[in-house]
Amino acid sequence: MTRSIPRWAPLLAALASACGPAPAPPAAPATDAGAARRAASMALTALSHRRFDVRGCDAAAARVVDEAAARAGTPQGERCVLVVAQRSDRTWLVAVRSALSSQSFGAQALVTVLPEGEGVRGIEYTR
């Protein structure tokens, strides 16, 4: 007895091969650690001129994250925390959470720093 291949078998094989793993999303551009540190330093300088307590904040300790994580900020803690993200327009978003022991006790500032760290575009304050 001979069996014939059903007419739909080649179609099934084509569909099965098309159902492979999804392509990986494009890799995020590598962030220059030095540029991120300069952006954090510019943000700290701008905040210190605006009576935001930045004692204990260290630009060298800034963590590089994505923009959503920077906007979300960090929880209040005993130490000042800085997170930096490079936005699609090449500006930097720096989230600075002051320490609970500071005069700004747990306040957070979102600072938009210009692409080359040459100045600040804006500052938003939250708690």
Image: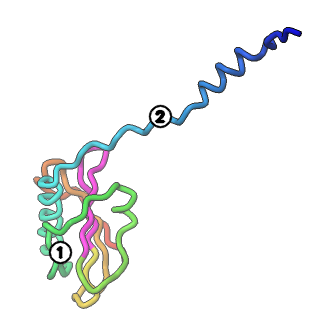
**The one of 105 and 84 positioned closer to us in this rendering:** 84
The type of residue carrying mark 2 is Pro
| Residue 106 location (% of width, % of height) | 31, 83
Distance from label 2 to label 1 (Cα)? 47 Å
| Residue 91 location (% of width, % of height) | 24, 50
Where 26 sits versus 92, above or below?
above
User: Tag 2: Cα neighbours inside 10 Å, few (<14), some, or many (≥20)?
Assistant: few
Task: Check disc 2 and report its element: helix, strand or loop.
Answer: loop
**Residue lying at the far front of the rendered structure:** 1
Q: Which residue is drawn at 35% across and 72% down?
A: 74
Q: Which residue is drawn at 59% across and 25% down?
A: 18
Where 85 sits versus 29, above or below?
below
The magenta segment: 81-96
**The one of 77 and 43 positioned closer to us in this rendering:** 77
Q: Mark 2 points at which residue?
A: 23
Q: Mark 1 points at which residue?
A: 50
The type of residue carrying mark 1 is Arg
Q: Residue at x 30, y 49 (%)?
A: 87
